[in-house]
């Protein structure tokens, strides 16, 4: 970061980041991805879930993010998110990173059903 900002160096503040960095300049961001059909479908699907189902989905995500807590504990914590804020919260999460792992932690397969 120090190299990118040019701190302590005699470089222009608006110089391009060095090759190999993960930083993106605002002009490099694909803003169309934020308005994609896939994103709209996901938003509609999440909005159609009941508040309890969205709360369980949030708890599933938190179960992966907070491995020392039980599902019951994260479910209680997820109840603090008001139903009106749940869709926005879930849209801000990369769900594909957490759902499969959360189901695995609960002893479920990819279908969401317990494995026998």
Image: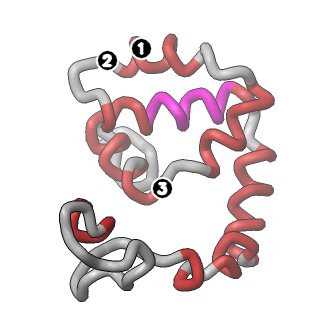
Residue 72 tag number: 1
Mark 3 sits on what residue?
94
Could you say where residue 103 lies in the image, as x and y percent from the top left?
Answer: 36, 43
For the residues labelled 1 and 2, say whether their Cβ atoms are less than 8 Å apart: yes
Question: Which image quadrant: the C terminus?
Answer: top left
Image position of 109 (left or right of 24) = left
* Residue pointed to by mark 2: 70
Q: Secondary structure at mark 2?
A: loop
**Nearer the observer, 72 or 15:** 15
Answer with mark 1 or mark 3, whichever residue precedes in sequence: 1
Q: Residue at x 50, y 15 (%)?
A: 77
Asked if residue 56 is among those painted magenta in the image, a careful observer would answer: yes
Q: Along the horizontal axis of the image, is 89 left or right of 76?
A: right
CA neighbours of label 3 inside 10 A, class few (<14), some (14 to 19), many (20+): few
Dominant secondary-structure state across the stretch colored magenta: helix
Q: Position of residue 45 (x, y in %)?
A: 74, 54
Residue at image coords 80%, 46%: 48
Neighbourhood count class around disc 2 (C-alpha, 10 Å): few under 14, some 14–19, many 20 upward: some
């Amino acid at each position: 970061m120090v190299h990118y900002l040019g701190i302590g160096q005699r470089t222009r503040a608006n110089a391009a980041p060095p090759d190999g960095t993960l930083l993106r300049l605002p002009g490099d961001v694909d803003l169309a991805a934020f308005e994609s059909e896939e994103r709209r479908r996901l938003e509609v699907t999440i909005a159609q879930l009941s508040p309890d189902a969205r709360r369980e989905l949030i708890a599933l995500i938190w179960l992966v993010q907070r491995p020392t807590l039980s599902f019951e504990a994260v479910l209680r914590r997820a109840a603090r998110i008001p139903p009106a804020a749940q869709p926005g919260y879930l849209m801000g999460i990369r769900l594909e990173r957490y759902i499969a792992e959360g189901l695995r932690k609960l002893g479920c397969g990819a279908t969401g059903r317990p494995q026998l």
